[in-house]
Image (spheres, coloured by chain):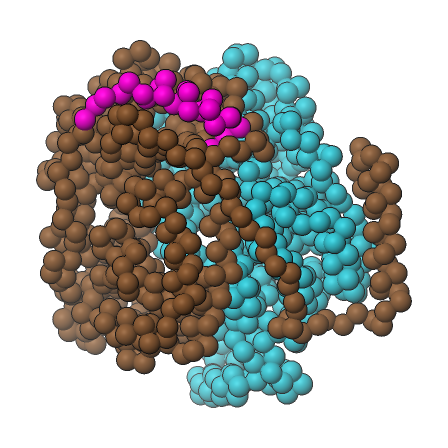
Chain colours: A brown, B cyan
Amino acid sequence: MSKHSSPRLIIIFLITFIIGQSGILSAAPFSLPDHAKLTYGPLKFDPPQPSRITMPNGLTVYIIENHELPVVKITLIVKSGTMYDPPGKEGVSELTASVMRTGGTLKMAPQAIDETLDYYAATIEAGKGLEQIQWSLFSLKKDFEEVLGIFSQILREPLFDEGRLKLGKDLKSEEIRRLADDPQNWAFKEFNRLLYQGNPRGRLPSLSTIKNIQKSDLVECHRRHYAPENMIMALSGDIRREDAEMLLRKAFGDWNAKGQIAPVAAPFKPFSPGSYYIVKETPQTIIVTGQSAPKKGSDAYYAFDVIDFVLGSGGFRSRIFQEVRTNRGLAYSTGSFYRARRDYGVFGAYAMTKSASAPTALHVIQDIMKNVKRDGLSPKEIDGAKKAILNSFVFQFDSLHQIVTQQALLAFDKLPADFLQQYRQRITSLPPAEIRKTAANVLTPDDSITLILGSEAGYLHIKEIYPDLKRIIVNYD
Amino acid sequence: MAKLKNRPIIIIRLSFLTLILLLLIFFGATVSFAQNGTDLDKRVRSFTLKNGIRVLILERHISPTVSFYIRVKAGAVDEIEGKTGLAHLLEHMMFKGTKTIGATNYRKEREVLSEISKTGDLLDQERAKGDKANKDQVEKLKERLSALQKSHRPLYKSNEIDRIYNENGAVHINASTGQDMITYHVSLPANKAELWARIESDRMSNPVLREFYQERDVVMEERRQRTDSDPDGQLYEKFAAAAFMVHPYRRPIIGWANDISFLSMTDMEQFFLWTHAPQNMVITVVGDVETAKIRRLIENYFGRIPMRPSPARHETKEPPQTGEKRITVRFDANEQLAIGYHKPALPSPDDYRFDLIEAILSRGRTSRFYKTLVETQGIAESVSAVNGLPGSRYPNLFAIFATVRSPHKIDKLAGAIDSMIDDLKKTPVTDVELRKVKNQLQADFIRRQNSNEGLAGILSYYETLLGDWRYIVNYEKNIESITPLEIRDAANRYLSQDNRTIAIMKKD
């Protein structure tokens, strides 16, 4: 008990203590109830709605007040990313964002920005991305106006200081040089390259493309992508909505830049399956196998989400995890993933296992896929997956910043604002026949992209079982 | 303080997304905290059950969800020689169900499990003979073990705990093992608190060691993935082993491969009984709950766990280091290094000083390491400082990790880091620089309070480590009072050449 507690609280505590104790003393010795027979009260659940403003220049902002802590947060989603990088200049979108942050602005030198932000313990950072770049801002409430001003300068009038550009290029080059040091990271990068072959999404930065990039490329990338119509903003924090709106209009209202983004085609037209092997002398083999999958919000999307859950993303009971890890002890990391986007989707499965068991692990995963394609899911599995998805739905609204960011992301993807509510209804009413049909139509275990990364000996061994396996040599020069 | 995010821990499952992020647990940005105006000291309720379990409750009504942390003050550091990895494997086994969860016929199951245990022991005894093992005997025992596992299968439902939690909407179902403690945590919709109490109070007293030998293999794969195939994992393991001569902090949390492969069910039962005794346990609940109700629930469910003896722990003290240690780690990866200096643990005031030194050296773009080594000299790709490895219960290390930038050589980088340490020992930090890092530590603390998990994590961490969660409330005061001269003085007392270990990863 806290010695700072008020007397009233102490009294309440004494009472509850007595009630708690007497309950135990008067009743029979407590025995554990059957967990399946526990009953639960209703969950009161009414997430607050963010307000939305659209400025005359096209910038849309979602705002939600949050007075729990004296801070303000912004997430900004920008239509930029490596898939827009011109051939030979792969890496330019990432460098543009990072040097916007580090390279100074018309009004502030690079060093001054760094020092101001660090002194206020504020952060403004850009992420990396394939199809979008997310910026984040964090500031204590008391410094927010000034930090927002810096953010506005960074977005609107970056200077791309040559020294900071060189630093950015050098660091990116070192990252590329070190890519193959980490087998997991390397394998997933190369899997993506193969999966998206023939599409701009499959092009990766290399030492020469980074070397090729000049300041003028960054200026051009900024001009094309950083304009109000190409971004959506989400703000939450300890600030009144009207005040936030006023500050945002001051920072961005007179920004009249027009972007110019050439559309990028969706991948997988046609999908080109194949199995590939990269040699790295490492005690564990990494297997990633994948294919195209339903796009977000399509009719098959809901059923396939359930299928992915049961196959390998729905915890220890999901089929791949249960069989590869629990039953056979073949891997620590194994399962499936489903990434659905506005105009396409990707589904895959993975396992990391000692070289000797790689063929078995791959075989088990393929077998599971084939079974689900042929027979669909059991009623028990469907019921379990639906319960899990619906009961955990509340966690989609666990924080106010999450709520406001979610709305921004939906708007960015041009999905309806009530997409999540619709999603919940679609999952609830999903008929088993639909799941069966989707499994049969979508899953193509015989025509997938498979990447295996492991030792030379492992290659010779698995090649005997999979003669079509192609050994590939990749470098990042 | 920087104690949570960077603490090396091993967790039971990795999601696809966290695969890559995991490295951050080792070398990521540091997270620290200080008091602010959120009145935690008035809002947290704490009490002790009759059996010794400490309980912290914090109401937070942001959304109808709640986060539960159970921490046990026992970890890898408490294992005995030759049984490394036991704490971590036990943490995995705690997901295998109880006498009433996952059991379909426990009486019969118990007999089969006892046979599995005996057969596994015989098999391990034979395997332990290495080249002299009787191969026929090994094969025979393997077949017997596999037959027993098959006959066990109809007697239980696998992975029931995870299934029940999942279907009831739980997220972040996970557990972790560190040198100092084992942690079990889960978040649930707020109306499902009783389910948590039902499952956790049961597994904290009645775990059943199902699928033990399969899980031992899973952990061998985990070791291959995180240590044997990963340059950061490799370097860190060898570095810690070199830095400590006798203290158990020298051993990897996941265990040495050969130790893991001989861990037995009997070892585990004994280890469980004393480590998970109620007096070693801290329960923390943060979220949309009513304190009185949740308190009753905890008293009902956890109050019945019987007290168990927990033997006095002996600490093998690390003798003072009397000269620099240098090791080379050959690995198929680009060069990087780790440097560690011995220093005292909390509650020593020096620990707070090293939190500030950590931030001065490596927090943000204006930190000394970044500005000098990455930006100006261009010889490093990354440099980070971490206060308090491999654990915080016992005297530990102030560590520096760095990756070199081509075409520079690692020795040059090591030399440059050295001269920056010298600066720290010679010149007191300026008031502006000190103010900056104090601001950062304060803001970090505020950030962490924005989720149920974050709050439950820090409250339970310090309650378990120090027996007092109020460490975080007093943190700002303790940090604020530190002067530039005290920092210089701490640097001079600990950051000496004789007190350090350097591990360098080289390709050839």
Highlighted magenta segment, given as a residue range: A236-258
Instruction: Say whether residue B371 is visible.
Output: no
Figure disc tally: 0
Q: Is residue A219 left or right of residue B275?
A: left
Comparing B255 with A52, the one in front is A52
Q: Residue at x 76, y 45 (%)?
A: B46
- Picture layout, residue B449 above or below residue A201: above
Q: Quadrant of residue B402?
A: top left
Q: What is the quadrant of the N terminus of chain A in the image?
A: top right
Comparing A473 with B52, the one in front is B52
Percent x, y of residue B385:
48, 32
Q: Residue at x 51, y 32 (%)?
A: A65
Percent x, y of residue A293:
25, 62
Residue A252 is covered by the magenta coloring? yes
Percent x, y of residue B7:
53, 43
Q: Is residue A414 left or right of residue A112?
A: left
- Picture layout, residue B506 above or below residue B87: above
Instruction: Say whether residue B97 is visible.
Output: yes
Q: Is residue A3 left or right of residue B455?
A: right
Percent x, y of residue A307:
35, 68
